[in-house]
Image (cartoon, coloured by chain):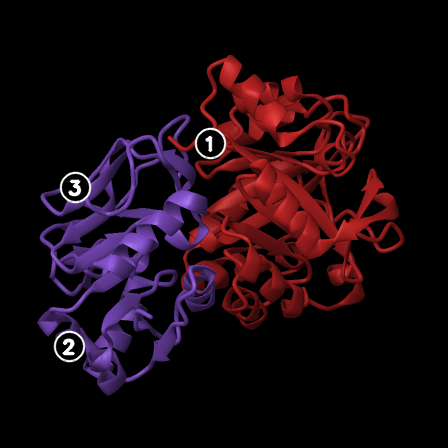
Chain colours: A purple, B red
Amino acid sequence: MTALTILDLGYGNIESIRLAFARLGVDATLASDLAEAEAADRLVLPGVGAAGFAMERLRSTGIDDALRRRTRPLLGICLGMQLLFERSDEGDTLMLGLIPGQVRLLDPAPGRPVPHMGWTRIERADGVGLTAGDHVYFAHSFACDDGPATAARVTCGRPIPAAVRSGNLWGAQFHPERSAAPGAAFLTAFLAA
Amino acid sequence: MPAARIIPCLDVADGRVVKGVQFEDHRDVGDIVELALRYRDEGADELVFYDITASADGRAVDPSWVSRVAAVIDIPFAVAGGIDSVDAARRLLAAGADKVSVNSPAIARPELLAELAAAFGRQCVVLGVDSFRAPDGTLRVRQFSGRPEAMREPGLETIDWARQAAKLGAGEIVLNCMNNDGMRDGYDLAQIEALVAAVNVPVIASGGAGTPRHFVDAFRAGASGALAASIFHDSIVSIGAVKDTLHAVGIEVRR
């Protein structure tokens, strides 16, 4: 069975991600220090929480540099994907800088409330197990810049990446652990990467 | 834009799903996990579990059934009931809930909303508002609605309170129109429109659904999601029929 590790730094939706992999027959282990994170074959960086707090936890454990050096598969979910980018408007936080681009606040407009909350249709997708037309579940107020790493795109006032992929570096702005069959397909694709 | 969300609401009392009419006379409608799975299979976009007696009983939602739900379903769910601190919310999110919904404790201490948003992000923080249309037409907030004998009016107007809550950190507002609850004669569309115009966060309509057409009306009034309980529990209307009707009039749904 594929060895899977979820980074547990005291923030994030670890349990719901762990349970989603369990439904796919994969028992994830939790990593809470540098050695465990570096030993992981496949590593998941969870979401939910504040960018500044998450980056501080990564820095103080030295895991930030381990992630920058990492060549084996890494998946960031929601905030975890935002951490892969260069900088966030959320508290003007310096992020990991693994993917070019910024993380910016979404602007509300009539008929388009923020947070972006709910099931939004994927417009195009490539190489991450998703198909154009799939609806996946989002819950976020900040979004990453669209760019060459975008592997699945939605429009939320502006085009934003629903998922990114750059080699073994994966990210999901949506919540695959709560996105029914398309979410499971995405996680399955990551497990096969 | 996200698809229109259909959200079955499961009122929980003593670990079972119950349903009342206008928040009274609760009767047992089934096991939490069985109903969660049934609605997930029928196409629910999200679930909300209200522990309806928690606030009035002075306790928070029990994390043990939250874990059981989180293990089996692959759609998002919110939990509500007596969540009055960051620690209480953390236990429920750690058990696998996606969002926490607060109502009476936020009325008692509005800073709770800011504390929750700072800890988890506003997308995790839902405000439930029990709104009663008074005889003079004003919309008033009610507190402790889960227990008729404990219910009181804190002296807030619905729109003012919702606007304040969204500024403090609520990332979504569930508007429970109490006069319409369980009556099956439609959502309070004027009230939904007024709230949608007043806040920038998603508004979820609750109270009064009786036919698929009522859902069309709620989404046309600007709701991001529509909540219903008795019509789904009693199989009066199926989630599939609601989505077929929405799709037929050009409202995007997930299928």
Q: Crowding near pointer 1: few (<14 within 10 Å), some, many (20+)?
A: many
Same-chain check, marks 3 and 1: no
CA distance separating discs 1 and 2: 39 Å
User: Residue B23, position in %: x, y?
Assistant: 82, 43
The image's mark for residue A66 is 2
- Residue mark closest to the camera, 2 vs 3: 2
Q: Chain of mark 2?
A: A
The answer to whether residue A141 is above or below residue A15 is: above
The image's mark for residue A146 is 3
Residue located beneath label 1 in the image: B254
Near-viewer residue (B216 or A30): A30
Amino acid type, callout 2: Ala
Q: Does label 2 or label 3 sit earlier along the sequence?
A: 2
Q: Are marks 2 and 3 in contact (CB under 8 Å)?
A: no
CA distance separating discs 2 and 3: 25 Å
User: Residue A47, position in %: x, y?
Assistant: 35, 61
